[in-house]
Amino acid sequence: MIAWCRIGEGDVDAGFFPCWVHPDGSPEVLGDDERGRIQMESLRTTGVNLDHVQLRKGCANQSAYIIIDRSTGERTVLWRRDDCLRIDPGQVAEEQIAGARLLHIDGHDTPAVAHAAAIARRHGIPVTVDVDTIYKGFDQVLPNVDYLVASSEFPGNWTGNRDPFEALESLQTQYGMKVAAMTLGAHGALARAGGQFIYAPAYVVNCLDTTGAGDVFHGAFCYAVLQGMTMPAALDFSNAMAALNCTALGARGGIRGLEEIRLLMARGERRSHPDFAARAQASGAPPTD
């Protein structure tokens, strides 16, 4: 997935962050079947600019069946994406990225992602990445990443160091990224920035469905970066957005506007992991609430 974004230029109280997207094999390259058409219309109604989305003729759209545990809201995803949805580096044009304020990527179609990140770096455009597994060739992507926000498993799997603090520090040192972070699910998020670790506890909500929580976290984080938030504020904001999304069914079912986000941040109960909080504070970070 490649998305170059101009988020933060308008009113986000509608509850979503408008984003100019480009296809590369995630949902931005769509099949021309009924599922693809439904997805296209769903994105259009939320105000997403679809100028560069491709409909691949004779190709089935990416699909997923999601099984939700009603007692916890946790889900299992049965996912299918045909090879005809792949995008190659030559299909990512420099002019499509050069005018963006931010480039957000993941690991799908890694050569195209590496090409896009290199373009962004040449133009001084910040690059954020969402990654949860090791992709072949991803070492060509990481040198051009400014903000790594990985799953809790990725840093340890990539570095071979199972200590999350040491793994994040190793990634940041090796690739020179501004921020190396990981999401921690029900325990919030951890980041290394400015020579110290920052731990942001999760918000406690009535969780119905965790589908899309990670994606909403990343979208909120991109918005926070463009708004110039401090890293503690960015992590808190992203945690709040992700938590609220879990209060309704569906990947976008619980996305809220700024007023509700700020209310949760001001009054919401937090769930803190004592070990993460203590080690982050020992690195020089301010204590968490």
Image: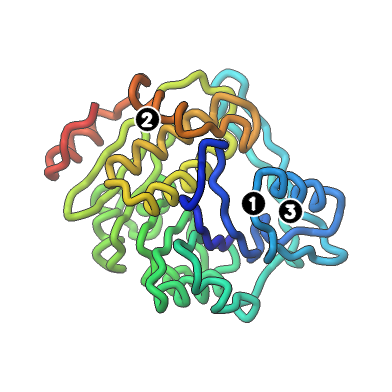
| Marks 3 and 1, the one that precedes in the sequence | 1
Q: Nearer the viewer, residue 232 or 284?
A: 232
Q: Is residue 164 left or right of 212 when viewed as pictured?
A: left
Gap between marks 3 and 1 measured at Cα: 19 Å
Q: Which mark is residue 62?
A: 3
Q: Residue at x 75, y 51 (%)?
A: 40
Q: Residue at x 64, y 58 (%)?
A: 26
Q: Which mark is residue 210?
A: none
Residue type (three-letter) at the residue carrying disc 3: Gln
Gap between marks 2 and 1 measured at Cα: 28 Å
Residue type (three-letter) at the residue carrying disc 1: Val
Gap between marks 2 and 3 measured at Cα: 31 Å
Query: Which residue is identified by label 1?
Result: 48
Q: Residue at x 35, y 19 (%)?
A: 267
Q: Which mark is residue 202?
A: 2
Q: Is residue 152 above or below residue 87?
A: above
Q: Is residue 5 above or below residue 213?
A: below
Mark 2 neighbour density, 10 Å: few (under 14) some (14–19) many (20 or more): many
Secondary structure at badge 2 equals strand
Report how many numbered discs are placed on residues in the image. Answer: 3
Please identify the residue farthest to the front as the structure is shown. Answer: 10
Residue 28 lies, in percent from the top left, at 67, 59
Quick check: can you spot residue 75?
Answer: yes
